[in-house]
Image (cartoon, helix red, strand yellow):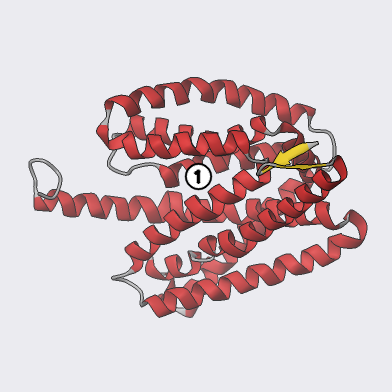
């Protein structure tokens, strides 16, 4: 028996409600969250890949090739691939939530603290649901995976404690610390997939799309950026739908959905993270710092 918003439901109703919550969470991830990664086409054009058809074609071949390679490695070594994906997600989510005006070490601490809360916190606070999803994603036993997650969690806890201490002393971190605490309450109280969907759709996606649009506004017409995002989104949906239909007869609806959504996310996150975290964001953060320094060479910031 469980209580949702003050309503007591029986175990059978509880299972049904959890199924509905899971479906809604997955749909939110696909419909609301996925388009933020589909902006990579616009990002690539802004970085010069759209100067010719051949350059854009080479970008697409490399991007899709990396995604296919990730799927191949996942099918070969599922537990290791899933854990690697979790570590990459910690870095990618945390980097997106971090403040670019922090010194390197505090920013690393903030990155690990935010990303670890989403990935490790959700996994640990709702182990039953997380383990069921992980079993579908690794096609079997998850014992070794949980050993790795537990070790990562014990490493993350002191980093998060240091982050809280830094947040109390540094005014720049007050807003992010408040966000982190609210997110921690959400992670602790909500089912794993629901908590992930809320973070992924309402924090990570919105923050990413806003930043990218601000960076692109002087380089690419908004109509082109939106058009490319819609095109890449539709292509991703079509590919996912075909894989889902292929898996459905042998796996069933829920396992097939989890495999398509999360293995698909892993396949797309690797090239997405390489593009955004390694190429696009550092380049434009550096340009922004240079512009601020030019306004005030002594302080390194605009007055």
Residue found at x 88% / y 54%: 251
Q: Name the foreground residue: 157 vs 61.
A: 157
Q: Quadrant of the N terminus?
A: top right
Looking at the image, residue 198 lies above or below residue 246: above
| Residue lying furthest right | 250
Q: Quadrant of residue 100?
A: top left
- Number of numbered labels in the structure image: 1
Residue drawn at x 67%, y 27% as measured from the top left: 148
At a point 52% along the width and 34% down the height, the residue shown is: 184
Secondary structure at badge 1 equals: helix
- Seen from the viewer's position, the closer of residues 267 and 254 is 254
Q: Is residue 294 visible?
A: yes
Check the image and report above or below for 74 versus 57: above
Q: Residue 103: horizontal and vertical position, in percent?
A: 29, 34
- Residue 228 horizontal/vertical position (percent): 50, 75
- Image check: 227 left or right of 64? left
Quadrant in which residue 15 is drawn = top right
Q: In the rendering, at what x and y percent does residue 113 appear?
A: 47, 32
Task: Kindly tell me whether residue 81 is visible in this rendering.
Answer: no
Please give the name of the residue rendered at 69% of the width and 41% of the height, measured from the top-left corner.
82
Q: How far across and how far down the image is residue 118, in percent?
A: 56, 39
- 82 vs 268, left or right, is right
Left or right of 237? Residue 98 is: left
Sort mark 1 into few (<14), some (14-19) or many (20+) by Cα contacts within 10 Å. Answer: many
Q: Which residue is mark 1?
A: 93
Q: Is residue 46 left or right of residue 64?
A: left
């Amino acid at each position: 028996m469980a209580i949702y918003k003050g309503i007591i439901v029986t175990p059978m109703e509880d299972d049904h409600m959890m199924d509905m919550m899971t479906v809604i969470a997955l749909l939110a991830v696909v419909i609301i969250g996925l388009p933020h990664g589909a902006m990579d086409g616009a990002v690539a054009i802004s970085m010069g890949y759209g100067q010719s058809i051949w350059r854009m074609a080479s970008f697409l071949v490399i991007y899709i090739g990396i995604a296919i390679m990730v799927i191949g490695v996942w099918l070969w070594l599922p537990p290791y691939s899933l854990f690697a994906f979790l570590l990459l997600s910690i870095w990618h989510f945390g980097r997106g939530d971090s403040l670019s005006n922090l010194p390197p070490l505090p920013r690393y601490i903030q990155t690990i603290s935010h990303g670890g809360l989403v990935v490790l916190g959700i996994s640990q606070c709702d182990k039953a649901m997380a383990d069921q999803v992980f079993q579908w994603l690794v096609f079997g036993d998850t014992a070794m995976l949980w050993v790795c997650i537990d070790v990562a969690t014990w490493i993350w806890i002191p980093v998060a404690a240091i982050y809280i201490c830094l947040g109390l002393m540094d005014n720049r971190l007050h807003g992010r610390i408040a966000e982190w605490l609210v997110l921690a309450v959400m992670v602790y109280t909500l089912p794993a997939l629901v908590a992930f969907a809320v973070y992924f759709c309402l924090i990570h996606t919105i923050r990413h799309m806003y930043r990218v649009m601000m960076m692109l506004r002087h380089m690419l017409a908004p109509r082109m950026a939106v058009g490319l995002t819609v095109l890449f989104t539709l292509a991703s949906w079509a590919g996912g739908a075909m894989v889902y239909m292929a898996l459905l007869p042998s796996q069933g609806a829920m396992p097939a959905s989890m495999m398509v959504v999360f293995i698909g996310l892993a396949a797309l996150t690797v090239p997405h993270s390489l593009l955004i975290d390694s190429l696009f964001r550092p380049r434009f953060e550096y340009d922004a710092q240079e512009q601020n320094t030019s306004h005030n060479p002594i302080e390194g910031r605009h007055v």
